[in-house]
Amino acid sequence: MRSYTFVISPTDIDASNTCFAPGHQYTDVPGRQRPPAWARGRRIQAVSVTRVLLISPVPDRDPPSGDVTYTRQLLASPPPGVEYTTYDQALDDGTLVEVGSRSAVSTTQGLARVGQLLVAAARKAEHVVRRSGLTYREPVRVFRVQNDAFDLVHVHVFSHLFLGTRPPVLASAGGPLRWVYGDAWGWSDRRLRIADAVDTLIGAAWNATLCGRRLGQANLFVAPSTYLQRWLLARGWNPSDIVVQPNYLVPPPGGSASPRSAHTPTLGFVARDFDAKGGHTVLETFARLRDSIPDLRLLVAGSPPPADAPTAGITWMGEVSREELLQDVLPQVDVLVYPSHFDTGVPYSAMEALSLGIPAVVSDYRSLPDLVGDDAGTVCPAGDVDAFVASMLRLLEDADQWDSASTAAAQRFNERFSARSQAPRLRTIYDLALRRKSVSDRRRRRWVT
C-alpha cells in the first residue's frame, strides 16, 4: 500500500479531475475529497509531505489570544504539502522534550538526568529574575527535538533555544515584548530600557532566539507587517533574515455585508481589552455621532461594559464565539471602529470584518494601517476623536463612498489576508527556510535595543 500526498497546482481543473485536500496522505487510490476553500477549482499533483513542528500557542494549554487564533488558522488551512504537528502533540508523543521541565527531569535517567537538572537550575534562576519585575516575564523555552521527525520547526512568539541537532528553524512574531509592556501595560521608557538590557543578557547566556528581538538559531524571521520589518531593519537586522507574510484567515461563510439600507446604521467594536483597544475613544466618538445620526447603534463584542458606561443605543454583548461574531454581530455592522492603542499585528476580528466587505476606521498605531490600505476604510491618529467622527460620518452618510470602501475591503482581504492567497505563499517561505539550512546553519546574533 502506498501513501500519496497532494497539493494544488495553478492549472485550472477540468471535469475529469478529482480534487483532494492539500497536505493530507491517502492510501492507494483515494476517493473524492472536499478540498479547502482556497484550493477548489485547481488541478492536483503528487508531492512529498513537508513535516513542520509548529511551536505556537494552542487552546487549553495557552491563554486565549490572537496567537492561539494564529495556530488555529494555520491548522485549518495549512500551506500546500505541509503536515503540521503542534508542540503539545509532539510533547505527548516524545518527539519534542522541554528540557529542564518537571516532567523531563522526572522521566530522564543516568547522565542525561544531570543535564536536565542543570538546565532546570538555570531555568529557575531565570524565573527568579523575570518575576522580579526587572524584565519581561516570558521565559526562554529550552527544547530538544527528534531531528528525523520533522523537516522544519516553526516557532511563533515563544523565545526559545534548541539543544542538540535540529531541523531548520523559522521564527515569527507580531512584534517585540516591549510593545506589549510599554503600549498595553504602561511601562515607562526607563523601565523598558532596563527590561531590554536584562533580556539581552539572558538571551546571550542562552544564545536564544528572543521574540522579535534576536534571531538566535532561527534561519529566518517572518514579520506579519511591513511596519515590523522596517522597525527591525532600523535596529540593525539583516534584510535577508526577514520576510513579510501577513497572518491569514480562512474566509468565513456568509459572503458580504448587508446593504447599507437594510438596517439601522450600526457601528461595531470587537475587543477583549476595552481600554487598550481604544474603547473610550469609541464611546466618545459614538456619542458625538449620535448628534448627527440619532438612530445610530453601537454593538460592542468581547468586552463587558466599564463602570458608568452609557447604554443609550449601545448593545454590550460580552464574550461571543467566532460563530456568533460571524453570524449575529458582524452582519449587523456597517463600519468597524478600531481605535486601538495596542496591537502586535492585524487583529483577526478586523480581518473578518474586511472579509464580509465591512469598511474599518482604525488608528495609526504601528501595523494597523496595513489593515485598510488606501481605500478599505480610514486611518486616524490614535485618540483623535474629531478625526474618527469625521471619517465615520463620511462612510455613514455617503452611500457611494461606503459602497466603494466595502468593495475595497473585500478585495483587500482576498488579496492580502485570505488563506487562499497567503497559504501558498507561506509554503514558499518554508521552502526558503529549508534552502537556507546549508548556508546559514550557524548561530547569528541580531539585537534590538
Image (tube, grey):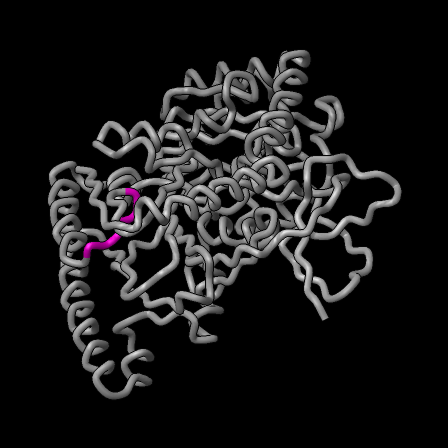
Q: Is residue 340 left or right of residue 413?
A: left
Name the dominant secondary structure of the magenta segment.
Answer: loop
Q: Quadrant of the C terminus?
A: top left
Q: Is residue 368 left or right of residue 33?
A: left
Query: Foreground: 149 or 294?
Result: 149
- Tell me which residue sits at (43%, 48%) in the image: 434
Q: Quadrant of residue 49?
A: bottom right
Q: Which span is picked out in magenta?
A: 207-212
Q: Is residue 105 above or below residue 303?
A: below
Query: Foreground: 97 or 433?
Result: 433
Which residue ends up furthest to the bottom in the rendered image? 110
- Tell me which residue sits at (35%, 61%) in the image: 166
- Tell me which residue sits at (42%, 34%) in the image: 244
Q: Is residue 41 left or right of residue 410?
A: right
User: Is any part of residue 328 visible from this angle?
Assistant: no
Q: Is residue 409 above or below residue 37?
A: above
Q: Quadrant of the N terminus?
A: bottom right
In the image, residue 396 lies at what x, y percent? 61, 18
- Tell me which residue sits at (18%, 53%) in the image: 203
Which residue ends up furthest to the right in the rendered image? 15
Q: How many marks?
A: 0
Query: Foreground: 420 or 346?
Result: 420
Query: Foreground: 72 or 111?
Result: 111
Q: Is residue 209 magenta?
A: yes
In the image, residue 167 lies at what x, y percent? 39, 58
User: Is any part of residue 128 visible from this angle?
Assistant: yes
In the image, residue 340 lies at what x, y percent? 40, 33
Q: Is residue 371 left or right of residue 326?
A: left
In the image, residue 4 lies at what x, y percent? 68, 60
Q: Is residue 5 magenta?
A: no
Q: Is residue 229 above or below residue 86?
A: above
